[in-house]
């Protein structure tokens, strides 16, 4: 009762006050009374406790940092969205620098999704390596989902929900501080095979942006094999990138043009066979004004391709690098876009720029003694869309450029002779390298056939060279014009963006406005059909130098006739040899630079031998479609193969005295740069090593088998293996047949030849069948370019044509019978001539007979 009276009194007081106050004031009073007694609004939630005092950075996810703990606040709207983890090196110690692993290199990408499990109180991170797509509504879709399910890569315990439960808070330390390798396996992916030491590793910073997050970590490991606890610490930037909700319309790969590609399989109920495709990697270029573009007008893209020049780049090279990027404008204009690609120099004091942030594509400058450059890119595996790219530019690449230019053009260009070029001359070479590497970041692979269709003598014509440079594509390894002679007056010696490059960009980037990739393919195909009649627009993939099948698709070569081009090249090398010392040394200098030039000249001579060798047993291999009028396989012409053998016998198998008996060798020896420093080696050792490789590869079983296949198909039109051995015998054993004494070099050459035959015919070697895993699909990896080398192993870009043409089990090959027959023929000759010549020659013959007898009759 007392309580009821009190309540009544309170109500009466409030009623009287309400009569005295206006309605608005009364409302405020009632609200005030309600707020005062409400205790729930002052209660601290778990979320508030966790983030209290934390530094916050809002963006795709809000990042909270509290002392040494880092949290992601993940909006539920971004759960189940496709994201890409992109890991890059930001800082490396000297040990990795020496190994060619440098700042700016991307070492791992992962497609992931964050999913919520309320039941388990966790956020699971799924890793989806799936490359499949299925037609919506088809019955097979259920089977596709069951047979290509994602994997659980990682989990995070849910720490709290935000106030309105629209986002989930998780602590993320373990995936960035080295506890777990799920998001970042830097030491595994760079080949060390070790794990981070968590006591010596930590998160340095984390930033959030509208569509990506960057987390920088310092990770430390023990150096494997070190006798003491030697440490190695790297700084890694791990990007988490939100991929477009609607992927770009992909463009399917076509073997007639060279793009890096990613695998994609298409399933549907109507199929009789799974549709396996490769999606080319390219930037998403869409016109601002689609109607004007489709009318044929030049239109700017919605989002141009922008490259930022690393502030670490020496200032005097920046303009040349920028020019190398802008040189691609003409190619994009042919594709219908203006101002499509831009290079910007970053101010030295720009605090916002972070070269490791995937919002910025960059040309990163690496302080290293590596003589190289590379142009990798990061792409969306669902569509092939390039989302970011970085050219890695090693400081010492200029040493390789200087060496190429001096050896290949020193005879015709005085600016290419010095130990140090003037900045303008080096700058033009840097511009060429910039264009080449940017071409890779646009998705283009090497086109090693781009130089193969220029007539050799046209390269000696100044006006032709000015218009066409050394090849129809800057993506070829057609370095500098070694064909031109001093009397020709050729001034343009540097590669340029050419007709093929413009075709490739137009094919890859022309916008058709189609949402269906199969309709898009039909329209893109029309462009290549029109281009098929122009040989300058041919694409031929990379081959290994020693096992090349198609002589047109080689690194470092020029022109449509490798024998003729190499002979011109030799003429220029012969002009260099007398200038070894005068071009490289001044009073008081040692002979190091002269020795390095001698080594470079030997290397160029050796390269010419393989340009020629590929003709022997060679096959021209074209990517063909019905109706283009081309043959897929055509054996190299008989006369061209015969000329190639004659070139090798004259210029490689017989010692070229102009190169290996130079008076300069009284002062210098060739010098090679190796990991342990500068190594000298004798000229004769250099010759024997090169000669043995060429002889061995000339007698390769697969090469001889292709010659026999040619004979089987073309009869008298073919250059046969028997003819080749007869031509070799006529050169190597002519003096033996006449009973004339052999000099030391001739004896050594006969030994090298006979030993190559013996090793191939060894019974034990023949009985061991070599088995190779033959995968019908080529997997393309990082787009890297080994400029200082003659191969591209980093990006697995070899076409592997020698394996494409399968020759059968090695022990069943007729090549072995031919080689044994050659040994028996040599044995018969030696038995007749064993007592002829001087004592050294007779001893040599006795030795050869013992070797042959031991091999054939063991």
Image (cartoon, rainbow, N blue to C red):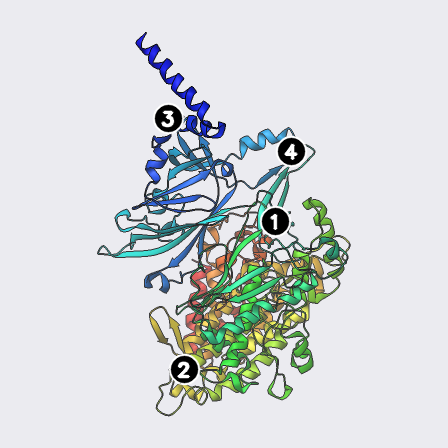
Real-space Cα separation, disc 4 to disc 2, in angstroms: 66 Å
Dividing the image into 4 quarters, which one contains the N terminus? top left
Upstream in sequence: badge 1 or badge 4: 4
Judged by depth in the image, the label closer to the viewer, 1 or 2, is 1
Real-space Cα separation, disc 1 to disc 2, in angstroms: 47 Å
Element type where label 3 sits in the image: loop
Query: Is any part of residue 833 visible from this angle?
Result: no
| Mark 3, residue position | 38
Upstream in sequence: badge 2 or badge 3: 3
Task: Mark 1 and mark 2 in contact? Answer it, CB < 8 Å.
Answer: no
Query: Is any part of residue 794 visible from this angle?
Result: yes
| Mark 2, residue position | 593
Real-space Cα separation, disc 2 to disc 3, in angstroms: 87 Å
| Mark 4, residue position | 136
Element type where label 2 sits in the image: helix
Instruction: Give the camera-side residue of 59 and 460.
Output: 59
Real-space Cα separation, disc 1 to disc 4, in angstroms: 20 Å
Upstream in sequence: badge 1 or badge 2: 1
Judged by depth in the image, the label closer to the viewer, 4 or 3, is 3
| Mark 1, residue position | 279
Res 330 quadrant in image: bottom right
């Amino acid at each position: 009762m007392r309580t009821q009276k009190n309540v009544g009194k309170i109500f009466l007081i409030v009623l009287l006050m309400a009569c005295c106050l206006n309605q608005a004031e009364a409302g405020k009073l009632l609200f005030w009374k309600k707020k005062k007694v409400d205790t729930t609004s002052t209660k601290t939630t778990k979320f508030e406790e966790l983030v209290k005092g934390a530094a916050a950075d809002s963006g795709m996810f809000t990042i909270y940092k509290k002392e040494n703990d880092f949290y992601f606040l993940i909006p539920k709207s971004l759960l189940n969205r496709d994201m890409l983890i992109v890991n890059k090196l930001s800082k490396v110690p000297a040990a990795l620098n020496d190994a060619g692993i440098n700042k700016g290199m991307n070492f791992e990408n992962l497609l992931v999704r964050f999913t919520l499990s309320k039941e388990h109180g966790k956020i699971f991170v799924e890793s989806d390596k799936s490359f499949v797509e299925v037609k919506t509504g088809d019955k097979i879709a259920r089977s596709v989902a069951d047979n290509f399910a994602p994997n659980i890569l990682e989990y995070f315990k849910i720490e709290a929900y935000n106030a309105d439960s629209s986002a989930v808070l998780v602590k993320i330390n373990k995936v960035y501080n080295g506890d777990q390798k799920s998001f970042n396996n830097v030491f595994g992916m760079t080949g060390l095979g070790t794990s981070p030491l968590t006591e010596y590793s930590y998160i340095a910073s984390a930033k959030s942006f509208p569509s990506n997050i960057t987390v920088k970590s310092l990770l430390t490991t023990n150096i494997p094999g070190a006798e003491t606890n030697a440490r190695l610490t790297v700084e890694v930037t791990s990007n988490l990138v939100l991929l477009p909700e609607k992927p770009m319309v992909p463009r399917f790969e076509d073997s007639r043009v060279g793009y890096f590609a990613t695998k994609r399989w298409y399933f549907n109920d109507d199929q009789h066979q799974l549709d396996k495709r490769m999606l080319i990697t390219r930037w998403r270029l869409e016109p601002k004004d689609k109607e004007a573009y489709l009318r044929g007008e030049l239109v700017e893209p919605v989002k141009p391709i922008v490259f930022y020049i690393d502030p670490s780049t020496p200032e005097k090279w920046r303009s040349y690098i920028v020019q190398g990027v802008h040189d691609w404008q003409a190619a994009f204009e042919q594709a219908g876009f203006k101002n499509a690609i831009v290079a910007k120099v970053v101010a030295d004091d720009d605090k916002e720029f972070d070269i490791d942030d995937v919002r910025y594509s960059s040309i990163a400058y690496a302080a290293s003694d590596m003589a190289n450059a590379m142009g990798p890119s990061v792409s969306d595996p669902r569509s092939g869309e390039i989302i970011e790219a970085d050219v890695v530019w090693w400081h010492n690449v200029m040493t390789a450029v200087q060496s190429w230019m001096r050896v290949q053009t020193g005879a015709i260009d005085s600016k290419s002779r010095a130990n140090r070029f003037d900045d303008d001359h080096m700058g033009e070479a840097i511009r060429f390298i910039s264009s080449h590497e940017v071409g890779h970041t646009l998705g283009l692979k090497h086109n090693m056939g781009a130089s193969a269709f220029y007539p050799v003598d046209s390269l000696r014509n100044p006006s032709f060279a000015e218009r066409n440079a050394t090849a129809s594509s800057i993506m070829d390894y057609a370095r500098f014009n070694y064909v031109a002679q001093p009397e020709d007056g050729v001034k343009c010696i540097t590669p340029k963006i050419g007709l093929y490059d413009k075709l490739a960009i137009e094919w890859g980037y022309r916008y058709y406005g189609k949402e269906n990739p199969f309709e898009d393919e039909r329209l893109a195909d029309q462009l290549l059909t029109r281009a098929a009649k122009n040989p300058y627009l041919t694409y031929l993939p990379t081959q290994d130098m020693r096992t090349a099948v198609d002589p047109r698709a080689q690194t470092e070569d020029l022109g449509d006739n490798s024998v003729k081009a190499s002979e011109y090249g030799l003429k220029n090398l012969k002009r260099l040899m007398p200038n070894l010392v005068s071009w490289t040394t001044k009073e008081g200098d040692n002979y190091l630079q002269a020795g390095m030039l001698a080594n470079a000249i030997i290397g160029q001579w050796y390269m010419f031998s393989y340009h020629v060798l590929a003709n022997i047993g060679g096959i021209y291999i074209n990517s063909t479609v019905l109706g283009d009028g081309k043959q897929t396989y055509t054996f190299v012409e008989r006369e061209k193969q015969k000329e190639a053998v004659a070139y090798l016998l004259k210029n490689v198998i017989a010692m070229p005295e102009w190169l290996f008996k130079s008076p300069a060798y009284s002062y210098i020896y060739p010098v090679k740069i190796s990991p342990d420093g500068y190594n000298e080696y004798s000229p004769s050792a250099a010759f024997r090593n090169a000669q043995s490789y060429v002889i061995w590869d000339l007698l390769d079983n697969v090469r001889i088998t292709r010659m026999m296949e040619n004979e089987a198909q073309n009869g008298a039109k073919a250059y046969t293996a028997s003819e080749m051995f007869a031509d070799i015998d006529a050169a190597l054993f002519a003096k033996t047949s006449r009973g004339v004494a052999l000099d030391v070099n001739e004896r050594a050459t006969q030994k090298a030849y006979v030993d190559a035959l013996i090793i191939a015919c060894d019974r034990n070697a023949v009985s061991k069948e070599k088995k190779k895993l033959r995968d019908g699909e080529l997997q393309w990896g990082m787009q890297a370019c080994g400029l200082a080398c003659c191969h591209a192993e980093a990006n697995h870009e070899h076409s592997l044509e020698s394996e494409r043409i399968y020759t059968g089990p090695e022990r069943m090959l007729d090549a072995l019978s031919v080689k044994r027959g050659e040994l028996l023929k040599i044995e018969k000759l030696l038995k007749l001539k064993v007592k002829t010549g001087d004592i050294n020659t007779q001893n040599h013959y006795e030795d050869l007979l013992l070797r042959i007898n031991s091999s054939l009759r063991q």
